[in-house]
Image (cartoon, rainbow, N blue to C red):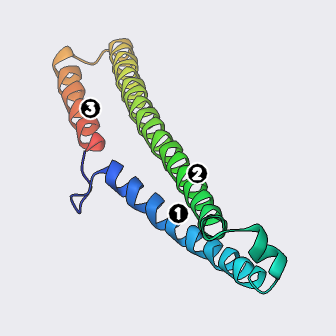
């Protein structure tokens, strides 16, 4: 299943999730970097942490926000795609039901016309031509 641009829906969802996750992660990286940079001014912070823990304090919040945002985006897009499929299915079902109703209405109208023509004493040949005319008009209306 491809879109107009040739990008599949899965690739589209992946790209959107990656983009949103990177933006959110980068925005979270700014305050965490600032917090560690500020902490480096205090000797107790420097003594209590080593370079690995300070690196983790900068990276891990950004990675968490990236993963959370990307997962929420994927989940949201999957729900949207499910809703689109359901809507398409319901629209098709409605169209089929509507067509059946219109066909039944045409049959009922034809029967009613035949009954009224028979009651009025109209010949069957003129009734037959009226029936064909009615069916042609009905066919043209469907287009």
135 or 74: nearer the viewer = 74
Give residue 106's quadrant in the image: top left
- In the picture, the quarter occupied by the N terminus is top left
What is the CA distance from the residue labelled 1 to the residue labelled 3? 61 Å
What is the CA distance from the residue labelled 2 to the residue labelled 3? 56 Å
Disc with the residue nearer the chain's start (1 vs 2): 1
What is the CA distance from the residue labelled 1 to the residue labelled 2? 9 Å
Point out residue 31 in the picture as x, y percentages from the top left corner: 70, 78
44 or 110: nearer the viewer = 44
What residue does disc 2 label? 72
Residue 30, numbered circle: none
What residue does disc 3 label? 134
What residue does disc 1 label? 21
76 or 20: nearer the viewer = 20
* For residue 103, above or below residue 8: above
The residue sitting at 71% across, 77% down in the picture is 36
The residue sitting at 78% across, 68% down in the picture is 48
Query: Which tag is nearer the camera, tag 2 or tag 3?
Result: 2
Query: Which tag is nearer the camera, tag 1 or tag 2?
Result: 1
Q: Residues within 10 Å of mark 3 (few under 14, many from 20)?
A: some
* For residue 108, above or below residue 93: above
Q: Residues within 10 Å of mark 1 (few under 14, many from 20)?
A: many
| Mark 1, secondary structure of its residue | helix
Q: Are marks 1 and 3 in contact (CB under 8 Å)?
A: no
- In the picture, the quarter occupied by the C terminus is top left
| Mark 3, secondary structure of its residue | helix
The residue sitting at 57% across, 68% down in the picture is 25
């Amino acid at each position: 299943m491809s879109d107009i641009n040739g990008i599949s829906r899965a690739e589209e969802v992946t790209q959107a999730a990656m983009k949103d996750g990177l933006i959110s992660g980068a925005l979270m990286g700014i305050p965490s970097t600032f917090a560690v940079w500020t902490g480096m001014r205090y000797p107790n912070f420097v003594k209590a942490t080593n370079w690995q823990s300070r690196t983790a304090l900068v990276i891990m919040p950004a990675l968490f926000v990236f993963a959370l945002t990307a997962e929420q985006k994927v989940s949201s897009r999957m729900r949207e795609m499910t809703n689109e499929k359901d809507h398409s299915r319901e629209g098709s079902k409605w169209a089929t039901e509507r067509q059946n109703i219109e066909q039944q209405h045409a049959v009922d109208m034809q029967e009613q016309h035949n009954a009224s023509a028979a009651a009025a004493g109209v010949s069957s040949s003129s009734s037959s031509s009226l029936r064909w005319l009615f069916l042609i008009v009905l066919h043209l209306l469907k287009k």
